[in-house]
């Protein structure tokens, strides 16, 4: 009986590792694929014929918003190319597109049914995380904050919850944040958490994503 239980535990653990490895491979493929795709688009942003400029800029804007909104998809190279090509106007355009893309990610995260997240975590055999999602589902914002404050380590809770806006802003500006989901992934998770209201998130975004476009607006041209 003991051997049977031990075998089942080992098999369950192996299945968990294989599924997590599959997710990691998928994320890596998205990241590398997105980087390659951004490079290909980058080469097309400087056309030989001026008549093509408007169409290419519109296409680049659409792709930038799409890639920025999707987790683990690096879009910064397209944004930088637009700012370099269009100068101060490009900086403002990229700023507004980034604001729109991350707002879309937040809204998608806010509307994802917790049951789907629960099933995904269960499929990955992440029982503690799935239980946490199940416990958080019926709670409102204040109840969620109190629950998370009680569950999280005493040293981490004040930093991540009491200063959550600063933590989100820091994550959005963290170099290489594509490895933790990028702006789209971070915004998606914040929306799913339901501990930040939409109007506060928009204001946070407006400030957090401003430094690079502002620098290009003032000095990049």
Image (cartoon, rainbow, N blue to C red):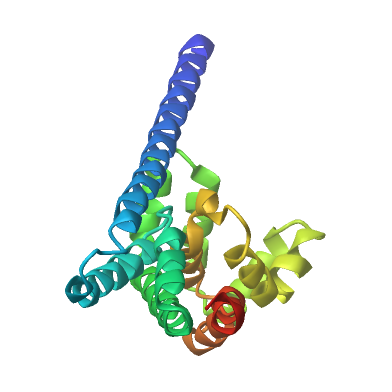
Q: How many marks?
A: 0
Q: Using the rendered image of the protein, determine whether residue 112 is visible from the camera's viewpoint.
A: no
The residue shown at (60%, 84%) is 218
Q: Position of residue 7 (x, y in %)?
A: 47, 14
Measured along the vertical axis of the image, is residue 32 above or below residue 205?
above
Q: Position of residue 137 (x, y in %)?
A: 46, 68
Question: Is 200 displayed left or right of 103 in the figure?
Answer: right
Question: Is 103 displayed left or right of 197 in the figure?
Answer: left
The residue shown at (54%, 57%) is 132
Q: Position of residue 121 (x, y in %)?
A: 43, 47
Q: Position of residue 77 (x, y in %)?
A: 44, 59
Residue 113's image quarter? Answer: bottom left
User: Depth check: 173 or 127 in front?
Assistant: 173
Measured along the vertical axis of the image, is residue 38 above or below residue 216?
above
- Residue at the extreme top of the image, as rendered: 3
- Residue at the extreme right of the image, as rendered: 155
């Amino acid at each position: 009986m003991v051997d049977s239980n031990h075998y089942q535990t080992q098999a369950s653990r192996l299945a968990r590792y294989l599924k997590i490895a599959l997710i990691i491979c998928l994320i890596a493929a998205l990241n590398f694929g997105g980087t390659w795709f951004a490079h290909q688009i980058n080469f097309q942003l400087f056309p030989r014929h001026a008549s093509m400029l408007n169409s290419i800029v519109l296409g680049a804007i659409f792709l930038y918003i799409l890639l920025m909104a999707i987790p683990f998809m690096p879009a910064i190279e397209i944004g930088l190319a637009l700012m370099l090509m269009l100068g101060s106007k490009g900086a403002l355009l990229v700023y507004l597109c980034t604001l729109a893309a991350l707002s879309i990610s937040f809204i998608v995260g806010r509307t994802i049914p917790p049951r789907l997240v629960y099933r995904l975590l269960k499929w990955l055999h992440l029982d503690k995380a799935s239980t946490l999602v199940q416990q958080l589902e019926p709670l409102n914002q204040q109840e969620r904050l109190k629950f998370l404050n009680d569950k999280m380590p005493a040293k981490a809770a004040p930093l991540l919850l009491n200063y959550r806006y600063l933590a989100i802003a820091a994550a959005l500006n963290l170099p290489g944040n594509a490895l933790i989901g990028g702006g789209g992934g971070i915004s998606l998770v914040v929306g799913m958490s339901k501990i930040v209201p939409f109007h506060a998130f928009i204001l946070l975004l407006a400030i957090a994503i401003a430094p690079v476009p502002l620098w290009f607006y003032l000095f990049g041209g």
